[in-house]
Amino acid sequence: MATLLEVKDLKTEFRTQDGVVHAVNGVSFTVDEGETLGLVGESGCGKSVSVLSVMRLIPHPPGKITNGQVLFQGRDLLQVDDEEIRSVRGNKIAMVFQDPMTSLNPVLTIGTQIGEALELHLGMTKEQARKRSVELLKMVGIPEAEGRLDDYPHQFSGGMRQRVMIAMALSCSPQLLIADEPTTALDVTIQAQIVDIVKRLKTELGMAIIWITHDLGVIAGLADRINVMYAGFVIETAPVKEIFGNPLHPYTLGLLTSIPRLDAAMKSKLTPIEGLPPDLIEMPKGCPFYNRCTFRTDQCANENPALELGAVRHSVACWNWQDVLKKRAAYLSGRA
Amino acid sequence: MSQAMSALEPPLGWASRERSSQEQLARRIVSNLPALLGAAVIVWMVILAIFAPIIATYPYDQTNLNAVEQPPSLAHWFGTDALGRDMFSRVVWGARSAVFVIVMVTVIDLGLGLQLGAAAGYLGGWVDTLVMRVADILFAFPGLLFVFFIAATIKPGLLAWARTHGLDDLARSGYLDYAVVIIALGVIGWAGLARLVRAQVLTVKEREFVISARATGVPTWRIILRHVLPNSIAPVIVALSMGMGDIALSEGYLSFLGIGLQPPAPSWGNILADNAGQYWRTFPQMIWLVLIPGLVLASVVFAFNFLGDGLNEALNPEISP
Amino acid sequence: MATSSDGALVQVVGLKKYFPITQGIVFQRKIADVKAVDGLDFSIQRGETLGLVGESGCGKSTTGRTVLQLYSPTAGQVVFQGKDLTKLHGEDLRKMRRNMQMIFQDPYASLNPRMTVGDIIGEPLEVHNIAKGKEKKERVQELLSIVGLNPYFVNRYPHEFSGGQRQRIGVARALAVNPAFIVCDEPISALDVSIQAQIINLLEELQEKFHLTYLFIAHDLSVVRHISDRIAVMYLGKIVELTDRNALYANPLHPYTKALLSAVPIPDPIIEEKRERIILVGDVPSPVNPPSGCRFHTRCPLAIDICKRVDPEFRDVGNNHWVACHVV
Ligand SMILES: Nc1ncnc2c1ncn2[C@@H]1O[C@H](COP(=O)(O)OP(=O)(O)OP(=O)(O)O)[C@@H](O)[C@H]1O
Ligand SMILES: Nc1ncnc2c1ncn2[C@@H]1O[C@H](COP(=O)(O)OP(=O)(O)OP(=O)(O)O)[C@@H](O)[C@H]1O
Ligand code: SF4
Ligand SMILES: [Mg+2]
Ligand SMILES: [Mg+2]
């Protein structure tokens, strides 16, 4: 499949009073046309900053993209002028955020807000935009869509607002949809509704998706490929079944064994990852996972491993991934 | 457990870099020039007030009919008035009056406003209704008018009380004037503070750590003192700072209108009143006699407001850019 | 009465909590009620963990807080250690709090930012006259190491800690008075995945060590399943199903429980591919005007006519498996 987006060695930092926050430290990944990429990792690991950098939406100051390329359909978005990037945003690449309330304008009706993008990017008339808005709202499963165009955001529930956000994002038929934790604030039953809709739209519209989450469960049923991020690095990337079936990085393994699973036999004890992620201001010089890793060796303290191929289409950034591979079974059963 | 413990140390640099809130506060104030200027003016006023007897070059009430209406000179930096009193010394002593009134009124406002506001907000029910209705009534009147009214009503009463108790000296000394001003300003000042404290307490009391304190079994008075008030205090400090400017100004008004401190007791308000009354006809001659005390009073009022603004920004990091 | 009560440490009967909605400023009139908790019956055995799950706004926190009398109940009884808490007031209730404590969801909001860790953990010791001065300090340090923190942290402030560490401080505070019963209100929801297991394990260890009884509130069914002995599922202010955790997962009876279980994502792409989901339509209705009859009938895939009219009884269908549904 053709590559839609290619990010090469992206680095983004924030200059704050306390020092330079190294939020994204040389991230590379690609998204193919129609592919769904999951971006997984815990709070502060740089998921949002990565995709905001792609969209050039990093607040400057304090933020700055210090290195890298973002090739979208062959063009480097970091080099194009402001007008061009605006024509890409919301049009070819659309974004949905975690909190649907803060990303909707409370004093404008839903109809006005969806219509705006249609009129702006696609040059539709008011009536055309209205008609299309109704179609879009129906597409995301909002009942009685015509009647709800003139409602204000506060008249919708959280789940409905998130659907409106998705409808708005889809309004210009983007080639890439970036969803930054779109279901984190929602209940499981509502999350299931949204995931269901996105799955359907993905096949119907054939767009590529970057789905950010810290919930491995949500992404398992949705993504084609997964990037696991830690402290501003992508530490493992593989097709979704590889990540869950053949995790090679100690952190990924830790994530999988530290959460209770609804379907698994009852375990007497969970295996937590002890300790905390490193401070992004004083980054360790070795592997960022070193202080929490049960597979570490002396080399890890001094040298930061780069991503290397561990299996087909499966890369991992760990000096000892072969050791992980050997001991994984014992690790899983011994702790279970 | 011991293994887990060592792993739970914060990563190096985590805690050490997190500055204490006091330090951050200080840093934010220092970076705000008007607030810094305001603080400097206020510090000066306090120094003048404390060391007035040393700094003043003459007694504030010493008249000298050989040297009336002198322009500013080396001997009389701010000139002299119609009775030959040294204006510089009067202004310096005026700082003492101002600081005294500001401190006393603030103490009353704090005492009443903080406690009544906190009780109303935390306890709710009839306590809340009672306190807030009284505050509403105080608010319904135009502030200064009400102060004049109170000052005018209690002054004769106080004087009569002093005389009937054989305190003629006290009645004549002018100290009772201070009491009148302080009581009048204090009586209306607390209401605004109480409202603010109550609103603050209402939000803080829903915060989880207050509920946590209740769940733990912490007694109510202790919850108010240790959990609610310390976390409600920031806007109160801002309001107090701005309020002090208002008190300085109100004292000026009162004394200017003759209800407050009476000459020869030195007050910026009555100095202004005296001189303006004497010289408005001959304007612009002797202009410094009005200009200097006016500027001093204005700069103090501005100083408190600048400081309040600065504190407001420093205590609410969200609103500063 | 739901569930047998012998040996029960906590017995809740017909518990209701309505929050009035008022209008007007000077003359406040009540115009409606938020029926946050609307008639709950359950008991918790000594040493047991009862899980309470449900969607946002269904009344879980309100239940926890009303059980502890942090909200005064609109109706019902809470019998704890043989005493009806709803009859206790003032100083009697305050003294009783020594035996029942709470752990909160938000590790950032639940610690007073202006108190040191030592004061935060030491306060319960002081207000219940358990320890003072040097003795108090020693006990605080002991508590810190029990929850896996460095005892030297006593003089630090909450902002110097990460979320997981703060949650440990909250746990230490709740433990300080040696309570019998702790309400844990979503104690891990605000934490990162990699930290959640640390706190779950800690709570389990402490339960064993100090024979604690938990009411464990959560919206994450996998976590509740892991930690609870029995589980109550709440919907819009009522318990719809209550049973042993294995029975609940192996044999859920209430259509809402089924939907809830099927909505939980499983971190396994192969299972997810094959899984059939019950996708509920619509949103949770407002607790101000809950639907007539069975509250779930507006979203229920199995609803029949009677569901609209009659509120189903919460009954034991055998093996202490309690459920409120006409179709079961
Ligand atoms: N405006 C900013 N100023 C300073 N630091 C920032 C800013 N925005 C982000 N950061 C830092 O960059 C790092 C990465 O943040 P990012 O928002 O990408 O995390 P995330 O992976 O999206 O986490 P979450 O799951 O919490 O959304 C964090 O450590 C954060 O503190
Ligand atoms: N103090 C209060 N005053 C008025 N209404 C309240 C109050 N506390 C809760 N409610 C309402 O009661 C209902 C139940 O709230 P509760 O906080 O118990 O839900 P919850 O199940 O804990 O939800 P969550 O998972 O979001 O924490 C909600 O509709 C809420 O809006
Ligand atoms: S490189 Fe070393 S420290 Fe890093 S994850 Fe691999 S084994 Fe652990
Ligand atoms: Mg983010
Ligand atoms: Mg809750």
Image (cartoon, coloured by chain):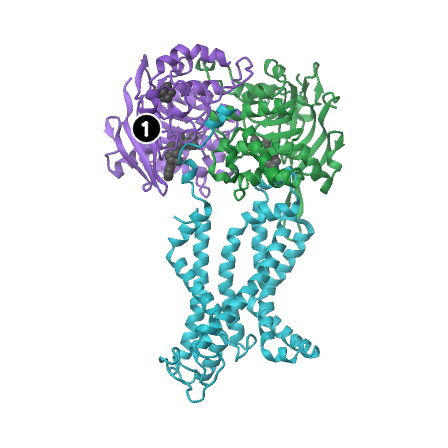
Residue C302 seen by the camera: yes
Where does residue A41 sit, x and y in percent of width and height? 41, 26
- Number of disc labels: 1
Give the x, y percent position of residue C259. Answer: 56, 20
Q: As drawn, is C105 to the left or to the right of A194?
A: right
At 51% from the left edge and 53% from the top edge, which residue is drawn?
Answer: B235
Residue at 71%, 14% (x, y): give it: C318
Q: Amino acid at mark 1?
A: Lys
Chain that the image shows in green:
C
Q: Look at mark 1 in the image and give the residue it sits on.
A: A285
Chain A representation colour: purple
Residue B43, picture quadrant: bottom left
Q: Nearer the viewer, residue A83 or B249?
A: B249
Colour chosen for chain B:
cyan
Q: Between residues B15 and C131, which one lies in front from this camera angle?
A: C131
Judge left or right: residue C231 versus residue A123. right
Is residue B316 placed above or below C46 in the rendered structure?
A: below
Percent coordinates x, y for residue A300 in the rendering: 34, 22
The vertical placement of A85 against B81, above or below, is above
